[in-house]
Image (cartoon, grey):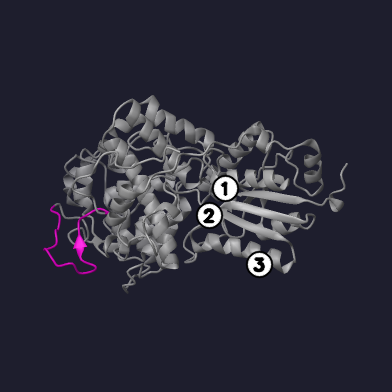
Amino acid sequence: MTDAHQFSGVLNIHWFRNDLRLLDNPALCYTEQLSSANGGILLPIFIFDNSRVYGSNVKSKLNSSLKCGPRRAHFILEAVADLRHNLKRCGSGLIVKVGKPEIIFEEIAQQMDIINIVCQEEICSEELSINEAVSSRLTSQDIKFNLHSFPGSTLYDKTTLPFEGGVPDTFSPFRKEVEKHSKIGLPLDAPSNDKLKLLHNTQEVLKEIGCSLDDNYMPTLADLGYIKEDIESISTVDPRSAMPEGYRGGETFALSRVKEYIWGFDLIQTYFDTRNNMIGPNYSTKFAPWLACGCVSPRYIARECSRYEELRVKSKSTYWVVFELLVRDYFRLFAMKHGDAIFYPSGTVKQKKEWNSNPIHFQAWRDGMTGYPLIDANMRELQATGFMSNRGRQNVCSFLAIELGIDWRLGAEYFEEVLLDYDASSNWLNWQNGAGVSLCTGGRLNRFNIVKQSKTYDKDGEYVRLWCPELQNLSDEFIHTPWRTSEVELNECGVVLGRDYPSPIVDPDIHGGSVIENRPKKQGKSKGRATSSNALPVMKSLPTGSYQFNQK
């Protein structure tokens, strides 16, 4: 057996983070090419950082929520297990560790001449600080290393975009310039089996440094630091969930979902018309959870949309799926430009506002007990399933930040805890947009009339009845405004406000409960004006299929 302590060579570590896939993974392709060039060992690794991300004791900065709730942690565990399975099919494997990355890399590097660590590029400060911790630790121990990061989470290669000094501060000019001048790169093939397969003597070396790819260790939620109560809270799948039946984390299910949605059921044909619905797995793509942890790439999805247009039909719906991937790109690039300002209470407009942190109101919002049925239904769905429709997200954000006046960052942190599809830049900038403190929308305040939204998007009250069963016997007329229902009807329905269902926590006649939408008077282009628009401006007319692909 080779003596690991005398082994002299290069170790090329592919550090999987939010890129849990083989197909169209630029960083992994680079790691494979690097190993071919320097003759080093290619070691895939994933690290569950239970000091910064995972566990029931790891809290957000405002200490209001967990950094990663148990449901998302379970989803990522499934994704990592699927990644390991796919790597093993290629003759490789995946080392899975729990702990601080900087400590784990130090332990591995002690027995190597040099290590190259390759990972997908991160954008936000918390993730970047982990890179800095790794570099600082290895430098302090006089370890020879290189840390390489590569873009791989966006639709467009940022180096090909027609902007100098960062993207524009509003979305429309960004979209127009990108669609006019830039092309989407074709997805990369997964590295071939012969490139990933390890030779027997290499495997022996790895065993002796504690990195055997034969090791099938996979931590449990308890190993990651989640308490029994948190683990039990996600032990079953709620039958009302809008997630696809039998969904799991991982590239295998992600690719299956893309194929099913686009090609199997032709659901992409009607996406534009159904995307604002709220019940069932197929009103929207549901690609977001897998995009968030990198089980599928946006380029792959866009390419499948383009193929569908070529082979079946081109429509506003096929374009709109790619359009929303472009919005996702914009948020990431905007976050890179503005850094920690996306986390400031004053937002990227840096406009000081007085926020409160009323714990009673905030808890009622979290628990779906505000007395506003649409808000409560959405928040209960989120807590029970880890998912909420885009329409619901805009409404609950507007209600928390504008009607309750609560610090929008508390809402963003709670979404970070519970969302299956949590993505830092998209989450925090959508919350800024809803709170009226984002440059993305020019500082506009997008105030949603909750009752009007309810009657528009849940006309017959089906969604509210699904998640607020205590209201199921109310008539369609009053299902969204139980406070307007007569005591006689409430009694006939077996509902006592304040006992069976909460009374509104704020006055409906003032805070989003009016049947007639309170439209503001026309004003000039002043920052912070109130509008009734969505989080991002919707163009009056949109071209279909205006994106382009590189053909090389």
Q: Give the Cα separation between the discs numbered 3 and 1.
A: 22 Å
Q: Secondary structure beneath disc 3?
A: helix
Q: Residue at x 47, y 42 (%)?
A: 297
In which quarter of the view is residue 89 placed?
Answer: top right
Q: Which mark is residue 136?
A: 3
Q: Position of residue 526 (x, y in %)?
A: 20, 69
Q: Main secondary structure of the magenta part?
A: loop
Query: Crowding at label 2, few (<14), some or many (≥20) Cα neighbours within 10 Å?
Result: some
- Identify the residue under disc 1: 27
Q: Which residues are magenta?
A: 516-536
Residue in the foreground of this view, choosing between 420 and 21: 21
Mark 3 or 1 closer to N-term?
A: 1
How much space separates mark 1 and mark 2, taking CA atoms? 8 Å
Nearest the eye: 237 or 125: 125
User: From the viewer's perspective, is 542 left or right of 354?
Assistant: left
Q: Three-letter amino acid code at disc 2?
A: Glu
Q: Residue 71, how many percent across, how many down?
A: 51, 46
Amino acid of disc 1: Ala
Q: Which residue is mark 2?
A: 121
Residue 270 rendering spot, x and y as whole percentages = 28, 32
For image coordinates 21% across by 57% down, the residue present is 512
Magenta highlight on residue 243:
no
**In the rendered view, would you say 38 is above or below 346?**
above
Question: Helix, strand, or loop for circle 1?
Answer: helix
**Which mark, by number, is residue 6?**
none
Question: Few, some or many C-alpha atoms within 10 Å of disc 1 (few <14, some 14-19, many ≥20)?
Answer: many
Q: In this orientation, does residue 429 appear?
A: yes
Report which quarter residue 537 is drawn in: bottom left
